[in-house]
Image: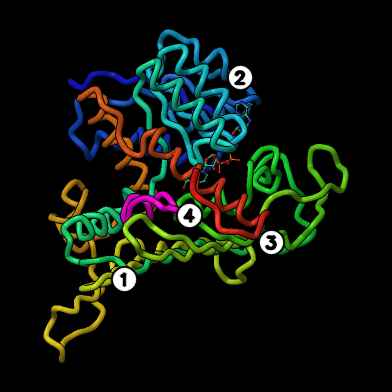
Amino acid sequence: MAKPLNIGLVGYGFMGRTHSNAYNRVTNFFDTEYKPVLKAVCARDAEKVKGFADTWGYQSIETDWRKLVERKDIDAIDICTPNNLHHDIAIAAAANGKMILCEKPLSMNTAEGEAMCQAVESAKVLNTVWYNYRRAPAVTFAKQLVDSGRLGRIFHYRANFLQDWTISADLPQGGTALWRLDAAAAGSGVTGDLLAHCIDTAIWLNGSMQNVTAMTETFIKERQHTLTGKVEKVEIDDACAFLCRFDNGSLGLFESTRYARGHKALYTFEINGEHASIKWDLHDLHRLQWFDHKDESNLRGWRSIHVTDGDHPYMNKWWVPGLQIGYEHTFVHHVADFLEGVAKGESVSPTFRQALETQKICDAVLSSAKTGSWTNVG
Ligand SMILES: NC(=O)c1ccc[n+]([C@@H]2O[C@H](COP(=O)([O-])OP(=O)(O)OC[C@H]3O[C@@H](n4cnc5c(N)ncnc54)[C@H](O)[C@@H]3O)[C@@H](O)[C@H]2O)c1
């Protein structure tokens, strides 16, 4: 019989749902020593949070996260709130000896992130940040291929994360669902929201970055603020592009925008090595494109590998070869790995400390966009 791991979730929006789904499903598919128990969910509106608790099976509710983190019957706090609350909740949770699963980006900036790292490290609590794309089987498989050395020396890394949902000037900023447009809640725009994912995957696959040069743009300069009702300056970046140098000598090219008409969530990356190249696309997340120069010359070409076989990462836990899984499974995999970490007493990647590296790169990108110069990653 699996041991219980009592979860206290803060925030029941988009991520609150993906995580709750993962907690509910994980032990149906993964044989783990611990089993998540949905002990409590917290958000400010008691009626709405009660409805969420009933839908997903939480045993109780709270309307103040401070009470939640103090509860003796909670083992792990899961932070699914807008970015401006990550720091305070994490610090309080660590002070109460709770394990912490925090949504990305880790924090609003490096200084906050550093304080969060110190809090979990001095409290010695297990911690992780939900950079979930690492656990799409095709992305994990890409990591295995890179680590095997089959690509040889890496020359280029390029990534895009393209959306189109903020093009209308009538869209307000701030408040429920639109906090991403409000710098006070989000910290930054596409840099912390979307490029953070691209950066996390990039440093995982290709190592640390030395320096960056970036440009950002805010296309719609003013929007009505939902909370104040006033037209206010928009302080977030609507689009960001940057170049970087990696420690391994390769060059990086990154672009993200919410103004690419026709694209909803097009996250792609490509790595070009001496012997082989890899491409991945979130819209086709169960496939990995692979080009191998070692193939006979007349047979050379891009292979589209359907990452669904039993020897592909995570896939022996699901259906039968050839049947694919999707977006929500990346979160199930993260929970499965976290539970394995709990059994061993180890944090799973990316830890707060590892996610801080992404935060430092985001800060360097935003700073470079302001100064117009190459900026070292702090
Ligand atoms: N890993 C990913 O792919 C991914 C995707 C989307 C969002 N995120 C991250 O997840 C976090 C949440 O994003 P989302 O899309 O779920 O947002 P959302 O707007 O859908 O949900 C936010 C939730 O936080 C709650 N909340 C706000 N203030 C609160 C407070 N003071 N106390 C308690 N609850 C409060 C809201 O009620 C809401 O339930 C953000 O940090 C975001 O960057 C990650």
Q: Which residue is mark 2?
A: 63
Residues packed near mark 2 inside 10 Å, few (<14), some (14 to 19) or many (20 plus):
some
Mark 3 — residue? 217
Reading the image, the residue beneath label 4 is: 211
- The stretch of residues the image draws in magenta is 199-211
Tell me the SS state at disc 3: strand
- Secondary structure found at label 2: loop
Give the amino acid type for the residue marked by disc 2 in the picture: Thr
Foreground: disc 4 or disc 2: 4
Amino acid type, label 4: Asn
- In x, y percent, where is residue 36? 32, 26
Overall secondary structure of the magenta section: helix
Can you give x and y, in whole percent of width and height, for residue 290 in the image? Answer: 25, 72
Cβ–Cβ under 8 Å for marks 3 and 2: no
Q: Earlier in the sequence, mark 2 or mark 1?
A: 2
Choose the circle earlier in sequence order: 4 or 1: 4
Q: CA distance from mark 3 to mark 2?
A: 37 Å
Residue found at the far right of this picture: 230
**Which mark is on residue 200?**
none
Q: CA distance from mark 2 to mark 1?
A: 49 Å
Left or right of 99 in this view: 264: right
Location of mark 1 (residue): 272
Q: Which class describes the residues within 10 Å of circle 1: few (<14), some (14-19), or many (20+)?
A: some
Instruction: Residue type at mark 3: give it.
Output: Glu
Direction from residue 251 to residue 272 in the image, left or right: left
Q: Which of the two labelled residues, at mark 3 and mark 2, occupies the earlier sequence position?
A: 2
How far apart are labels 4 and 1 at the CA level? 20 Å
